[in-house]
Amino acid sequence: MVLMLAGEGNSADGRWQAVVARVRIGPLRGPGSRDRRRRAPRRAFPWTNRTTNQVPTMRRSTRQARTSRSRFSAVSRALAVPALLLSLVSCATEPITGRWVFLGAVGEDQINAMGVEAYDQILAEAKPSADASQNALVERVGRRIAGVVDQRIQEEGRQPYEWQFVVIDEPTVNAFALPGGKVAFYAGILPICADEAGVAVVMGHEVAHAYAQHGRKRVNESVIAQAGLEAVNIALSSGENEQLAGLTMAALGVGAQVSQLAFSRGDESSADHIGLFLMADAGYDPRPAVEFWKRMAAASEGAAPPEFLSTHPSHDTRVEQLEERMPEALERWRAATGAAGVAAVAP
């Protein structure tokens, strides 16, 4: 289950990535790169054997060492480019969690427009649910939690989102939220939700992604990662050792992918945290969140990937974190409803 930008293998993810691709930056060119390509062939060294045109072993080792140092220097300069870009990207404090996140380069208005475009593309091909009760349930819960977010956004000096909630008539066990408050539930997740409280758990998680601007964060991370890979590629692809350049790029590609997965997993944990508090602030008893994720674990039947390479925390980690935050969530719920341990919302 991938909550935010649609699941892996889901057609919605491909459409979102196609929209995100528009912010990819062009290739970087290091100073003097053309000069290196046009450099004249080196003259034979005075100590070269003119009969065999070979350099003595000691001299050849010296040249190789100098070349290695030169390549190392080039890579260092190339890596300084994304580091500089990273330092220029503005930081912001994530609401509720207090986590520092990168939200520069691509602005909120731009990312929200991208979210609307992707959402429209998805709905143009999806089949909306004809079940009036499903639609009413998702709409009701969504508006209730979104109302809490709108109030917080206004207090932060931001413009409230134009929220939209829809149920897609597909058996996929999934839900997602795109930037700007565009939320969709697939019909397949509703039986696992079981009741309104379960829908509130998923809705809180999804609305949290939109509120915390996780889509914007990931786009900016993609820009930085793309800049780094392009810079290193230029530094290494001098034509002298294409195999080395290819192997290095492959290694960095894997590294960049794992790094992005780790960021995404952090976003998911934050969405659990924020979503738990949002549903409590909206008057929903937060305790059903633990039971919902236990049902999700049972539904997966061991099919979930290892946590290290997953975009979500493991079910055990997720439940443990929710239980740690439950006392504060209950305090927020009671403050919002005046309840004294009695569920504020009936199934």
Image: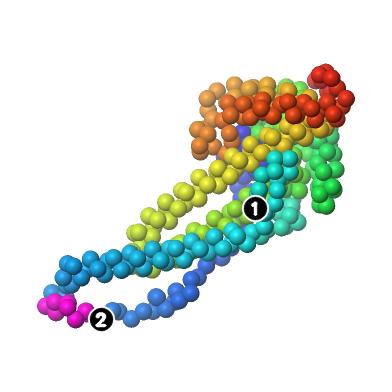
Tell me residue 115's x, y (percent).
Answer: 71, 50
* Quadrant into which the C terminus falls: top right
x 64%, y 41%: residue: 267
Q: Position of residue 11 (x, y in %)?
A: 62, 43
* Residue 130 appears in the figure: no
Cα–Cα span, label 1 and label 2: 50 Å
- Crowd around label 1: few <14 · some 14–19 · many ≥20 (10 Å): many
Q: Identify which residue is drawn at 31% across, 68% down.
A: 66
Q: Secondary structure at mark 2?
A: loop
Name the residue beneath numbered marker 1: 102
Judge whether 288 appears above or below 162 on screen. above
Q: Which residue is mark 2?
A: 43
Kindly identify the residue that appears in the image at 50 percent across and 33 percent down. Answer: 306
- SS assignment at label 1: strand
Amino acid type at image mark 1: Phe
Examine the rendered structure and indicate whether residue 3 appears above or below residue 154: above
Question: Residue furthest toward the right?
Answer: 338
Left or right of 254 in this view: 279: right
Of residues 243 and 270, the one drawn nearer to the viewer in this rendering: 270
Residue 50: within the magenta?
Answer: yes
